Image (cartoon, rainbow, N blue to C red):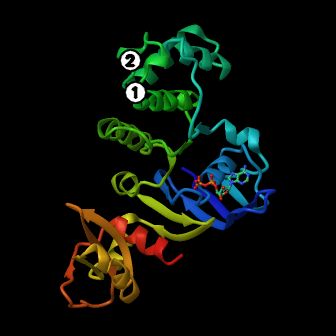
């Protein structure tokens, strides 16, 4: 299967905000995590990939397709789940999905019925098929969003911040669904949640302020900082001093006390203890630098 190749992509909005600055990424089959804080440029990149927005510069290819020029062609291979989408609250999942299938050009009634059933089963919504969408939970809505995105049997599925607001059980179920889709398609997931990437992605890119800071396989990225992360529980009033003297990459509360992680080439002594590096350490050490 073809790889999606993004090269030198830039985008500045008319208000002068440069949302993307020379982004280059190779995205193979599997679940790819686009990880970055709010405002990093993730949605802008997703919308350009979904052919809903123009880039100023750069190119995107998928096999023989020039994505930025052959939009109609790409759309045939594309499924997109935007950050928020409206649903008709008084229609059942089954009726809306069937209706959307008609709009997708699936005119054969028998084929359509089979497809709707298969997608509702795949997204664990079959038992709720007669329920009105207005009564769906956040996770069910997201899974319905995936069901509609899969109507065209896409080779590329783009999902923008899909796990925000889901409870742990729903999030887990959603991860399993994406992982399954990633076995046969390119799934691009944008998120600010490091654990989404840790649990799900074979490849990731950390982006901030429109730039790619780091890319690769999450486990390999962790290896690069292995042995360089140290932890210490300190007092609240000491936080400032520690930040001055060490490269503090994260600060969390544990039972109300600040626990800091620092990045250091060697053991710093001074009561620090070494910890197993995590993807969150990779992420925060990158974001810290900027
Ligand atoms: P993310 O999805 O990572 O939160 P976005 O792509 O939404 O990031 O935004 C990147 C930057 O571009 C932000 O500074 C945001 O305020 C700005 N931005 C996004 N959309 C627009 C727009 N339509 N007009 C002007 N600025 C925008």
Kind of element beneath mark 1: helix
Please state which of residues 290 and 162 is positioned toward the viewer in this rendering.
290
Q: Height in image: 200 above or below 229?
A: above
Q: Which residue is mark 1?
A: 122
Kind of element beneath mark 2: helix
Please state which of residues 134 and 159 is positioned toward the viewer in this rendering.
134
Where in the figure is residue 41, as x and y percent of width and height? 62, 58
Residue 207's quadrant in the figure? bottom right
The answer to whether mark 2 and mark 1 are in CB contact below 8 A is: no
Please tell me which residue is depicted at 66% across the width and 49% down the height of the picture. Answer: 49
Residue reaching furthest to the front: 237
Q: Which residue is mark 2?
A: 126
Is residue 181 toward the left or the right of residue 281 in the image? right
Q: Height in image: 214 above or below 143?
A: below
Please tell me which residue is depicted at 74% across the width and 47% down the height of the picture. Answer: 53
**Label 2: how many residues lie within 10 Å, few (<14), some (14-19) or many (20+)?**
some
Please tell me which residue is depicted at 60% across the width and 14% down the height of the picture. Answer: 99
């Amino acid at each position: 299967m073809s790889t999606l190749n993004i090269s030198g992509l830039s985008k500045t909005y008319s208000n002068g905000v440069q949302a993307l600055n020379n982004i280059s990424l190779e995205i193979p089959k599997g679940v790819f995590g686009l990880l970055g804080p709010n405002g990093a440029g993730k949605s802008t990149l997703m919308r350009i990939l979904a052919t809903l927005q123009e880039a100023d510069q750069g190119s995107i290819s998928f096999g023989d397709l020039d994505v930025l020029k052959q939009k109609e062609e790409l759309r045939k291979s594309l499924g997109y789940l935007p950050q928020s989408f409206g649903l008709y609250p008084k229609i059942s999942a089954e009726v809306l999905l069937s209706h959307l299938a008609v709009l997708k050009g699936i005119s054969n009634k028998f084929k359509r019925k089979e497809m709707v059933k298969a997608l509702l089963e795949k997204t664990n919504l079959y038992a709720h098929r007669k329920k009105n969408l207005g009564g769906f939970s956040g996770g069910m809505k997201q899974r319905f969003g995936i069901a509609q995105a899969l109507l065209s049997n896409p080779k590329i599925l783009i999902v923008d911040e899909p796990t925000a607001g889901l409870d742990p059980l729903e999030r887990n179920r959603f991860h399993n669904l994406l992982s399954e889709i990633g076995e046969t398609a390119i799934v691009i997931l944008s998120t600010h949640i490091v654990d989404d990437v840790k649990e799900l992605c074979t490849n990731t890119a950390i982006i901030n302020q429109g730039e790619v800071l780091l890319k690769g396989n999450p486990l390999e990225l962790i290896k690069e900082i292995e042995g360089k992360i140290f932890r210490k529980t300190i007092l609240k009033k000491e936080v400032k001093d520690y930040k001055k003297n060490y490269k503090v990459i994260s600060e969390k509360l544990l039972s109300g006390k600040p626990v800091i992680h620092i990045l250091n080439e060697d053991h710093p002594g001074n009561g620090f203890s070494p910890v197993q590096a995590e993807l969150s350490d990779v992420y925060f050490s990158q974001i810290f630098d900027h």
